[in-house]
Amino acid sequence: MENFSFKNPVQVEFGKGKEKNIGEYMAKYGAKKALVVYGSDRVKKSGLFDTAINSLKAHGIEYAELGGVKSNPVLSKVHEGVKIAKDFGADSVLAIGGGSVLDSCKAIAAGACYEGDVWDFFFAKEVQKALMIFDIITLAATGSEMNRGGVVTNEATKQKFGIDGPALFPKVSVINPELQATVTPEYLVYSASDIIAHSIEGYFTATKHPEIIDMYIEANIKTVMKTTEILLKNPDDYEARGDFAWAATMALNGLTYVGVSGYSYPNHMLEHAMSAVVDCAHGAGLSVIMPAWMKWYKKNNEAKFARFAKEIFGLDSAEAGIDALKAWFDKIGTPTTLGGVKIGEANVGEVMEIIVRDAPKWGLPQYDAKAVKEIFDLAK
């Protein structure tokens, strides 16, 4: 195991009814004026928005609101939120929704404390100052509720990049699995794919990966697979929903990288270009690209791919394990071919050009035109 420093300051409030206390949690951190951000009006129709607002009011917290954050959140909406936050004099942001809403809030929180364009922070410099961030999570996938990063798409440049910094850890994250029971089957399986992708990036690419982290990741993946199948049959199974939600959080809260070195995020780099061009669901793009990338990359770490096959599927070869993962994605109904996310001859060239253009920013210049074409040929 490599030397490491680890810090995760997020206060997680997990369980039934915890969203009713959001005003109390925020008031303890001194919040007085909050920008409340959400996606669709479903949070209002369900009553969740009113529950949160009533809690804010009960604790003397004023609010402004911003709705309409979309899946694959965009920079223009962030700019809109930054203006509202500055004009309102917000000291905090409250995300009510999934990872797209929370990632937008993180960018808004940074931009509200910055005189320039918040895009300056994406793949450029750490965010050291931001408004306080709070969230009520309604979709388990990104793990943004317990980490210091977020992802937003710049529509003008078709760049889907990340923002990062110690100021972007949420102060308090509320995870009530009951709030996630209405997630559609499509977004449940896309979420499963996203969580698995978060789990395997370091697992396969790291030059140093401790045994205890291998086992931790394998347990997380098996939990996701088991609970996904349960929830497809019974969306109201609270225990399965809770395990699934916590697996999403644990996959990207930093613990899977303790003592790990020499890793990268190639699957996310590849998929970000896909969804930047065709606006496919992030998890759907990942379930397409993961098996293709695995087939292309396995020669670099054959032993770990063989271990994956054995530990996850009880199989005896690297190739069999990759095929089994793709078959599982097919079984649960998330796409496994480029056509399944509407990438074809008309736009695949643009996607690949973006990947090659941006690969150096990801620290992955080896993903040149030849490599990317080989991977995408395996995803057809």
Image: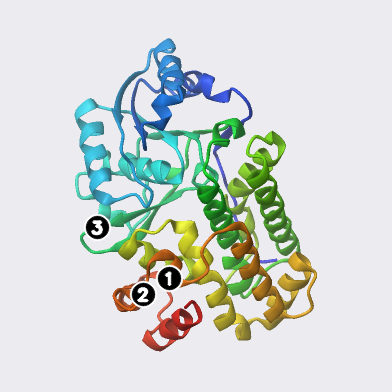
Packing grade of label 1 (10 A; few <14, some 14-19, many >=20) is few
Mark 3 or mark 2, which is nearer the start of the sequence? 3
**Amino acid on which disc 2 is placed:** Gly
Where on the picture, by quarter, is residue 304?
A: bottom right
Q: Secondary structure at mark 2?
A: loop
Give left or right: position of 146 versus 210.
Answer: left
* Residue holding disc 2: 344
The residue at 46%/86% (across/down) is 374
**Mark 2 → mark 3, Cα distance in angstroms:** 21 Å
- Single out the residue that lies furthest toward the bottom: 370
Q: Nearer the viewer, residue 347 or 110?
A: 347
Asked if the residue under mark 1 is in contact with the one under mark 2, i.e. CB atoms within 8 Å, the reply is yes
Q: Which mark is residue 195?
A: none
Which of the two residues, 28 or 277, is positioned nearer the viewer here? 277
* Residue linked to disc 3: 155
Q: Amino acid at mark 1?
A: Gly
Circle 1 residue: 339
